[in-house]
């Protein structure tokens, strides 16, 4: 598993912790960050519903970009970074998040957090950019291969178009 005994995962915009809980169950050390108190409460509920203690992962109420920048200054390294940013939002201290304006800065900060053998996953939806645009943006970061595409679920049956 990425050459370390217990890989570290940073889940920015972690929402209700589905990915964080799955990573915990696979042996990852997880830092789960979200700017919403409600989302962190759901994360705690989902940890409990999954039979995990609240302290099974690090839960952080913070602006994703501000947290990533601080982690870079601290010299933190992660084997995995998950990003599922909203189009726009507010941090807990009123920080403004606008996808088109701040994504490149966030990716740059996250690149500084990646360990030697690491992965970064960017998930987007309802954004006016193509997977090719994201692939080009990600290819500017130092490191390995970039894969980009669209996720589609085929319909079948009587109601399919």
Image: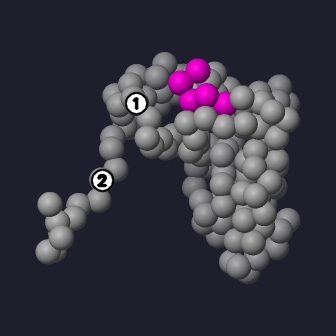
Q: Is residue 59 magenta?
A: no
Q: What residue appears at the point 66 percent right and 61 percent down from the top-left corner? A: 16
In this rendered view, identify the residue nearer to me: 31 or 160. Answer: 160
The secondary structure that dominates the magenta segment is helix
What x and y, as percent, mark residue 14?
Answer: 66, 52
Instruction: Give the mark toward the camera: 2 or 1.
Output: 1
Q: Which residue is mark 1?
A: 128
What x and y, as percent, mark residue 54?
Answer: 83, 68
Label 1: element kind: loop
What x and y, as percent, mark residue 102?
Answer: 62, 24
In this rendered view, identify the residue nearer to me: 41 or 30. Answer: 41
Q: Can you tell which mark lies on residue 152?
A: 2
Q: What residue appears at the point 78 percent right and 63 percent down from the top-left corner? A: 41
Image-quadrant location for residue 115? top right
In the displayed structure image, the side of residue 77 where residue 53 appears, left or right: right
In the image, residue 103 sits, relative to residue 36, either above or below, namely above
Q: Is residue 92 visible?
A: yes
Q: Quadrant of the C terminus?
A: bottom left
Label 2: element kind: loop
**Label 2 vs label 1: CA separation?**
17 Å
What x and y, as percent, mark residue 104?
Answer: 57, 22
Q: Quadrant of the N terminus?
A: bottom right
Q: Which residues are magenta?
A: 97-101
Q: Can you tell which mark lies on residue 53?
A: none
Residues at marks 2 and 1 touching, judged by CB atoms closer than 8 Å:
no
Q: What residue appears at the point 72 percent right and 57 percent down from the top-left corner? A: 39
Q: What residue appears at the point 66 percent right and 66 percent down from the top-left corner? A: 21
């Amino acid at each position: 598993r990425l050459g370390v005994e217990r890989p570290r995962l940073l889940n920015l915009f972690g929402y209700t912790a589905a990915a964080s809980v799955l990573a915990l169950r696979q042996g990852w050390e997880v830092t789960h960050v979200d700017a919403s108190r409600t989302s962190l409460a759901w994360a705690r509920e989902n940890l409990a519903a999954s039979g995990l203690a609240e302290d099974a992962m690090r839960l952080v109420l913070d602006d994703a970009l501000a947290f990533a920048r601080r982690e870079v200054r601290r010299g933190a390294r992660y084997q995995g970074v998950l990003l599922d940013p909203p189009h726009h939002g507010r941090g807990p201290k009123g920080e403004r998040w606008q996808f088109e304006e701040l994504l490149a800065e966030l990716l740059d900060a996250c690149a500084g957090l990646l360990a030697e053998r690491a992965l970064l996953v960017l998930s987007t939806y309802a954004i006016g950019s193509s997977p090719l645009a994201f692939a080009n943006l990600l290819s500017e970061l130092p490191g390995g291969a970039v894969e980009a595409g669209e996720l589609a679920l085929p319909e079948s049956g009587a109601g399919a178009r």
